[in-house]
Image (spheres, grey):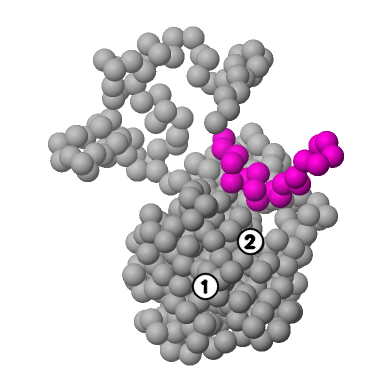
């Protein structure tokens, strides 16, 4: 995988996440994260994908709290895509540290 | 899997899966490999460096033949084949016409996956590259040394546009198709490009993506490209994506749109 591909693919997944974000403030966070993914050096992508996963996790919990199961379903699907991309691209090596932020 | 064993997801497998295996090529594959040529190691031995690479230079067609194989006088700015001049587009396309006119220069595998692969012969490629070069030169006013930005996905129009730029001596900058319009705009500003080549949409992972929206977003907040050549609004199915952009590249002026802050020429000619 080329570095440009990694940056572009992460950008695309974050765009998908942005489209299923129900909260305006969180949408801004995702937009900023996407901007970082597109502008930071490829070597700095790993922390961004970790933050993206943490953000997606928080979004899922928010949707559950609001009993918004359609939103939860869409966000969880993107979380899975994000995780799979991170693992396959080698950006997420230490997956044991990736745990949900809430019980 | 025996009863009682736990089901494992694909992601869990992927976490532990690493590409570490070694695969020995078959004897027949080794026999046909280029590096199996007799005397190869001797021909490219250290004591013959760098003159040994002359044989690769001789595989190309030169407009002006080079006089120095490698200039190491100003490291790290090493220069190969100093004094030489060639056209990369001519070497990739034109010179194959005499013998391989009807041979596939590239075979595009489109989406949706049910669509048939699209072969593009050297003759087709030659025509399309020239059409697009004419569009860049006459309609967009591109000259040698100018910068052009591509925001294109993996479609045949991408190599066509690249080759057209090489034909004119124009410098191209490809922005990954997945990037946002804002990121594309940053790269336009950084490169000082005044022409953006994009398309209206394409299929990605089975979904039709609205790519034109990014193209509209890209010039905002930058100096902006003078011209934004865009494929017309057609559903980019396998064949129509190809023909859509080829319609653009066939220099139809109404398929190129100028941003609001642009200054189009009074009478854009296309050929």
Q: Earlier in the sequence, mark 1 or mark 2?
A: 1
State the SS at label 1.
helix
Q: Is residue B36 above or below residue A71?
A: above
Left or right: B110 as drawn, with respect to B220: right
Left or right: B168 as drawn, with respect to B106: left
The residue identified by callout 1 is A55
Q: Is residue B76 visible?
A: yes
Residue drawn at the location 71% of the way across and 50% of the way down: B9
Residue placed most toward the observer, B251 or B267: B251
Residue B69 drawn at (x, y percent): 28, 30
The residues colored magenta run: B1-19
Left or right: B197 as drawn, with respect to B1: left
Q: Is residue B252 visible?
A: no
Quadrant position of residue B173: bottom left
Residue B2 drawn at (x, y percent): 83, 36
Residue placed most toward the observer, B76 or A7: A7
Q: Which of label 1 and label 2 is nearer to you?
A: 1
The residue identified by callout 2 is A81
Q: Is residue A93 above or below residue B243?
A: above
Q: CA distance from mark 1 to mark 2?
A: 14 Å
Give the quadrant of the N terminus of chain B: top right
Residue drawn at the location 40% of the way across and 85% of the way down: B221
- The answer for which chain carries disc 2 is A
Residue A82 drawn at (x, y percent): 58, 62
Task: Say whether residue B8 is magenta.
Answer: yes
Figure disc tally? 2
């Amino acid at each position: 995988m080329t570095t440009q591909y990694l940056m572009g693919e992460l950008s695309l997944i974050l765009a998908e996440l942005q489209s299923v974000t129900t909260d305006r403030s969180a949408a801004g966070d995702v937009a900023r994260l996407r901007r970082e993914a597109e502008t930071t050096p490829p070597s700095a992508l790993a922390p961004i994908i970790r933050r993206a996963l943490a953000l997606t996790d928080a979004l899922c919990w928010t949707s559950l709290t609001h009993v918004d199961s359609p939103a939860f379903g869409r966000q969880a699907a993107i979380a899975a895509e994000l995780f799979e991309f991170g693992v396959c691209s080698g950006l997420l090596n230490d997956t044991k540290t990736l745990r949900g932020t809430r019980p | 899997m025996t009863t009682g064993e736990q089901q494992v997801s694909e992601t869990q497998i992927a976490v532990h899966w690493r590409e570490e295996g070694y695969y020995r090529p078959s004897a027949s594959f080794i026999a046909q490999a280029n590096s199996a040529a007799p005397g190869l190691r001797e021909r490219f031995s250290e004591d013959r460096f760098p003159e040994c690479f002359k044989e690769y230079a001789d595989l190309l067609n030169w407009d002006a033949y080079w006089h120095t194989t490698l200039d190491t006088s100003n490291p790290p700015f090493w220069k190969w084949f100093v004094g030489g001049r060639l056209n990369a587009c001519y070497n990739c396309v034109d010179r194959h016409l005499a013998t391989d006119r009807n041979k596939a220069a590239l075979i595009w595998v489109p989406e949706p996956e049910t669509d048939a692969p699209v072969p593009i012969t050297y003759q087709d490629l030659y025509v399309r590259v020239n059409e697009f070069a004419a569009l860049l030169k006459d309609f967009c006013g591109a000259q040698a040394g100018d910068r052009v930005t591509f925001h294109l996905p993996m479609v045949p129009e991408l190599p066509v546009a690249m080759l057209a730029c090489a034909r004119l001596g124009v410098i191209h900058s490809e922005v990954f198709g997945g990037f946002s319009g804002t990121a594309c705009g940053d790269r336009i500003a950084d490169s000082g490009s005044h022409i953006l080549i994009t398309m209206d949409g394409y299929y990605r992972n089975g979904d039709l993506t609205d790519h034109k929206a990014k193209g509209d977003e890209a010039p905002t907040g930058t100096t902006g490209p003078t011209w934004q050549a865009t494929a017309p609004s057609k559903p980019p199915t396998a064949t129509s994506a190809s023909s859509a952009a080829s319609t653009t590249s066939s220099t139809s002026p109404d398929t190129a749109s100028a941003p609001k802050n642009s200054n189009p020429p009074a009478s854009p000619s296309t050929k």
